[in-house]
Image (cartoon, rainbow, N blue to C red):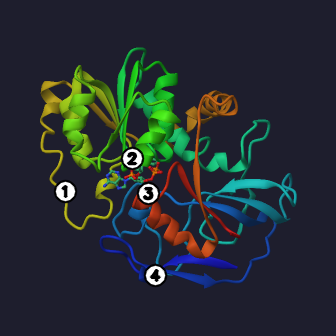
Amino acid sequence: SREWHLVARPSGWPTDDDFALREAPIKEPAPGQVLVRNRCLSVDPYMRGRMNETKSYVPPFRLDEPMTGDAIGEVVASEAEGIEVGDLVLHQLGWREYATLPAAWVSAVPRGLDVPDTAFLGVLGMTGHTAYAGLKEVAKVREGDVVFVSGAAGAVGSVAGQLARLLGASRVIGSAGGPEKTRLLTEEYGFDTALDYKAAPIGAQLAEAAPDGIDVYFDNVGGDHLEAALDALNTFGRVAACGMISSYNDTEPSPAPRNLGLVVGKRLRIEGFLVMDHAALRETFLREAGEWVSTGRLRHRETVVEGIEHATDAFLRMMRGGNVGKMLVAVDG
Ligand code: NDP
């Protein structure tokens, strides 16, 4: 069985030398365990943080051990009651072809919705749940809000933009890199306005797009985007600080936002959040968003890279913007 190990801690952008695809024996399941053949792996921005030595809300990946991440696979051997060979399960031992793990660490792929299984790694998985929690519990989007979402063509952002509308926003503005992505925002995901941050400075574009200001900013990017949003936010605006991907590969701290002081005068609420603290919302999210996905009101895309040997390429491509919607790896290619 092949598995990806982190073999060196990257400084700045990771390179091929930081990873190794290694062979390991397949472990037969002990009592209470299952053996899963992974079919599809998720690659996510937070994994970049786990490649650093620094302590964070999730521990660093260990060197010379398989990395972990969300995955969907098929049970090929089971020593656990209630789990049968052939069951499709979700779990967190991704980045490898086969995973042997306790039955308590897997959950059945939900049935009964007319959606592809991989939706549970994206729109109905962790990234969709993040968008939902950020809008509902952190930014508390309400009827009539003008909402700005950055990273809007990605997994979290594309769902956040559509959910904002479904939750009552009167206007939704999104930003992404390049004309193809911005076209997708307005044509497929129903954003009112799409800003291409690679074409012109985001601050001037946002000011022009929202002459009366914004009420909510869903931040996936940080830096210049957060700076632009702070200027545009109305008094008592709310920021759901979801991620700041523009700085994840920096070697030096970046200066923006230079206008952080506006938080005070405008009495802004900027709230960082982690999806794992919103586990109680998952059932409601699945019910509500599941219905929207299966009836076509919530659209989603995937970018699938074929072959486990290309998993680190897929991760880096995603970090550079080479994905629309959720970036996934099909293990067998
Ligand atoms: P995406 O699918 O959005 O992929 C990452 C995207 O980031 C790229 O496609 C690229 O799009 C964009 N990007 C990369 N560099 C820059 C830059 N310098 N400036 C602007 N955009 C950039 O990933 P996810 O949806 O999985 O994650 C989005 C954000 O949400 C991340 O910040 C992540 O860390 C965060 N997150 C937070 C969670 C939480 O619990 N708080 C949970 C899950 C995700 P483009 O081509 O438009 O540049």
- Observer-nearest of 19 and 145: 145
Quadrant placement of the N terminus = bottom right
- Residue at the (19%, 56%) spot, across then down: 254
Neighbours of disc 3 within 10 Å: few (<14), some (14-19), many (20+): some
Q: Check residue 254 in the rendering and tell me which mark sits there, or answer none.
A: 1
Q: Is residue 331 visible?
A: yes
Kind of residue indicated by mark 4? Val
Left or right: residue 8 versus residue 267 is right
Helix, strand or loop for disc 4 = loop
Helix, strand or loop for disc 3 = loop
Q: In x, y percent, where is residue 245?
A: 35, 54
Helix, strand or loop for disc 1 = loop
- Observer-nearest of 175 and 39: 175
| Image quadrant where residue 236 sits | top left
Between disc 4 and disc 1, whose residue precedes?
4
CA distance separating discs 4 and 1 = 27 Å
Kind of residue indicated by mark 1? Ser
Residue under pointer 4: 7
- Observer-nearest of 149 and 106: 149
Q: Is residue 132 visible?
A: no
Between disc 1 and disc 3, whose residue precedes?
3
Left or right: residue 66 versus residue 139 is right
Residue under pointer 2: 179
| Image quadrant where residue 248 sits | bottom left
Between disc 3 and disc 2, whose residue precedes?
3
Q: Check residue 45 in the rendering and tell me which mark sits there, or answer none.
A: 3
Neighbours of disc 4 within 10 Å: few (<14), some (14-19), many (20+): some
Neighbours of disc 2 within 10 Å: few (<14), some (14-19), many (20+): some
- Residue at the (46%, 78%) spot, across then down: 63
Between disc 3 and disc 4, whose residue precedes?
4
Left or right: residue 163 versus residue 39 is left
CA distance separating discs 1 and 3 = 18 Å
